[in-house]
Image: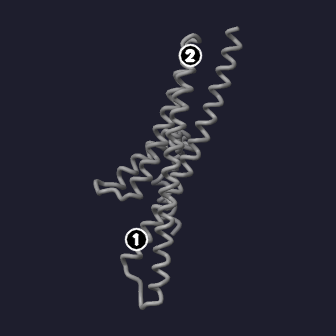
Amino acid sequence: MSSAYNRSSKDFPRSRISQSDSPPSSPSPTAKTLRHERIGRMDSGGLGLTTSESASDRAAARVNAYTQQRENRLASLSSKPDEESRKDFKKLYESAYNENEKLKSNLREAQLELADIKAKLERVAKKQDQSSSQAGLLEAEKREKRVLERRMTDMEDDLKVLTDLKSDNQRLKDENGALIRVISKLSK
């Protein structure tokens, strides 16, 4: 037994893993987004997406688009000369305001759809209670309930994303106002 152990330890020398071989401690947000998109494409696998998958994909696409726009705005602010950036503050404010209004309307639509889904879910739950007194539940009702629950959780996630986007938009609006005040003070 010991000779087999000695032989195996001689045949396989110890190897050290360098820091470059080890994975990073936490991936960047860009890497996370790309991985999420890649996984989403692999999951769909050419099959038709259900409404719950398309809703989450739309929410992810909205977040990605918003993040990209925000990065582009920040990059353009840091790269432009002072005179051009002063002129662009009004445009930036207007675009942020328009985007905020779009987000508000999306939030209202999501809340209405969520209320509708909750009402449908309650109706399904009542039907299920009535049918539970019978011998068994129909398989179609079970599937409908699961689909509605998934849609409801997806809508709640979308609602959270929209509120986060709204708060980010408000923060950017406040930052734009502060930058305008600083630039106006510097120009005097």
> x, y percentage for residue 183?
66, 15
Name the residue rendered at 46%, 74% in the picture: 124
- Tell me the tag on residue 17: none
The amino acid pointed to by label 2 is Ser
* Scheme of colours in the image: one colour
Q: Is residue 108 above or below residue 118?
A: above
Tell me if 105 is positioned left or right of 183 in this view: left
Mark 2 residue crowding within 10 angstroms, few (<14) / some (14–19) / many (20+): some
Task: Report which residue position mark 2 lands on.
Answer: 85
Mark 1 residue crowding within 10 angstroms, few (<14) / some (14–19) / many (20+): some
Is 11 or 172 nearer to us in this picture?
Answer: 172
The amino acid pointed to by label 1 is Glu
> x, y percentage for residue 162?
54, 46
Tell me if 111 is positioned left or right of 142 in this view: right
Name the residue rendered at 52%, 44% in the picture: 23
> x, y percentage for residue 153?
51, 61
- Tell me the tag on residue 144: 1
